[in-house]
Image: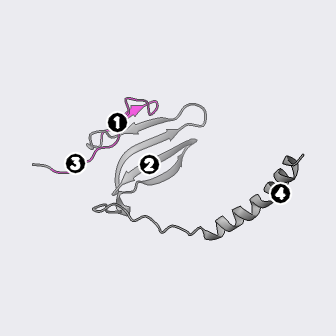
Amino acid sequence: MRIAPFLLASLLLIPVANAEEKSRLEALPDIPPPPGMVQDPALEPQITIVQRGQDRVEEFRVKGRLYMIKVTPPHGKPYYLIDQRGDGQMRMYDDLSPNFQVPMWVIHEF
C-alpha cells in the first residue's frame, strides 16, 4: 500500500522537473556552411509553369539554360523531355526511372 502514494507523488513531480529542465535549454546558433561552399542563387533551378492548351508544362532552367521539361496532360501520365548532353536536343522519358541521368554541366574544358 505504500507504493500507491509514492507513484502518485512521483507523477505529480514529473511536470515540475520538466519545466525546470526546459527553462535551462538554450537555442543553438545557426550552423555555418562548410568552408569553400558558395551559395549562389544563380545555381538554383528556376521553374516556369505554363498552360499550353490543356497540358501543364514545367520548364526547368539553371542560369537561363533549359535542361528539362515536364509535360502533364489532363488525362494520362506526365512525361519528361531532358537535354542530357547540353546540346539543346531533348530526349523523351516516360518517368524518372533508375536510368534517369541528372543534368551535367561542363566544369572545365582543356
Q: Which of marks 1 and 4 is nearer the N terminus?
A: 4
Indicate which label's residue lies in the foreground, 1 or 4.
Answer: 4
Three-letter amino acid code at disc 4?
A: Ala
Residue 98 colored in magenta in the image: yes
Q: Which of marks 1 and 3 is nearer the N terminus?
A: 1
Q: Work out how far the residue at label 4 is from the one at label 2, CA to CA, in angstroms.
A: 64 Å
The residue carrying mark 3 is 106
Which residues, given as a range, are shown in magenta?
A: 89-108
**Furthest residue toward front:** 2
From what the image shows, is residue 82 above or below residue 43? Answer: above
Crowd around label 2: few <14 · some 14–19 · many ≥20 (10 Å)? some
The residue carrying mark 2 is 59
Q: Which of 9 and 38 is in front in this view?
A: 9
Q: Earlier in the sequence, mark 1 or mark 2?
A: 2
Q: Work out how far the residue at label 1 is from the one at label 2, CA to CA, in angstroms.
A: 17 Å
The residue carrying mark 1 is 101
Q: Work out how far the residue at label 2 is from the one at label 3, CA to CA, in angstroms.
A: 21 Å
- Residue 57 place in picture, x, y as percent: 50, 45
- Residue 33 place in picture, x, y as percent: 37, 62
From what the image shows, is residue 40 above or below residue 60? Answer: below
Q: In this view, does 95 lie to the left or right of 67?
A: right
Three-letter amino acid code at disc 3?
A: Val
Who's the residue at 78% across and 60% down the image? 13
Q: Work out how far the residue at label 1 is from the one at label 4, CA to CA, in angstroms.
A: 62 Å
